[in-house]
Amino acid sequence: MDAPIDQPVLGSRRLSNYLVALLVSIGGVGFLLTSASSYFGRDFLPIGHPAELIWVPQGLVMGAYGVGAVLLSSYLWAVIAIDVGGGRNLFDRGADTITIERRGFRRLISFTLPCGDVQAVKVEVRDGLNPRRRLALRLRGRRDVPLTRVGEPIALAELERSGAELARYLNVPLEGV
């Protein structure tokens, strides 16, 4: 009996998301401090002289941008904290099941299907402006079920190795290579 394969899937906790959330947070706080400096007539920022800005319309618009950026950064930090999209793929031939779990905003999304429903393991590679490299299960009578994370493309060698290993484990063909 083969041991089950448990593949972790990276969600939103990746370096690029941390950097974007940090930059949006810093920018939002900067806009809010600029707006407050304009309103109170005091420089709250060490750079420039935002107190010299006229409150209406410049300071007010800066405040609106600041509020928007802080709200956006709050959303980004919440997505990172929850780790939306993270989860695992569990392939168990002993129990004849495939379980795919992902974290959503409010709940864990779990999808279980029998191994016999899998027709093939599909490797999809599309290069260009918007590259896509993904591994998916081709199911009988249903849509393909993606197995890899969204976002950063996986190295071709890793994608092919993972696809071949999974196809061997499930005794199905590997498509798209």
Image (cartoon, rainbow, N blue to C red):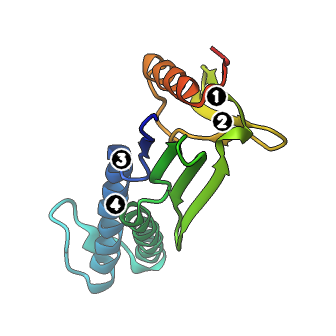
Extreme-left residue of the structure: 46
Q: Tell me the distance, in whole angstroms, between the alpha carbons under discs 1 and 2.
A: 5 Å
Q: Which residue is mark 4?
A: 27
Q: Earlier in the sequence, mark 1 or mark 2?
A: 1
Under circle 4, the secondary element is helix
Could you tell me which residue is drawn at 34 percent across and 71 percent down? 53
Picture layout, residue 100 above or below residue 128: below
Q: Residue furthest bottom?
A: 40
**C-alpha distance separating marks 4 and 1:** 44 Å
Spatial CA distance of label 3 from label 4 is 20 Å
Disc with the residue nearer the chain's start (2 vs 3): 3
Q: Position of residue 22 (x, y in %)?
A: 30, 57
- Cα distance in 3D space between marks 3 and 1: 26 Å
**Residue contact between numbered discs 4 and 1, judged by CB atoms under 8 Å:** no
Asked whether disc 1 touches disc 2, contact meaning CB atoms under 8 Å apart, the reply is yes
Marking on residue 137: 2
Disc 2 versus disc 3: nearer the observer: 2
Crowding around mark 1 (Cα neighbors within 10 Å: few <14, some 14 to 19, many 20+) is many
Question: How many labels, in total?
Answer: 4
The percent coordinates of residue 165 (x first, y second) are 49, 24
4 or 1: tag closer to the N-terminus: 4
Amino acid type of the residue that numbered disc 3 sits on in the rendered structure: Arg
Distance Cα–Cα, label 4 vs label 2: 42 Å
Quickly name the residue at label 1.
Answer: 121
Numbered disc 1: secondary structure: strand
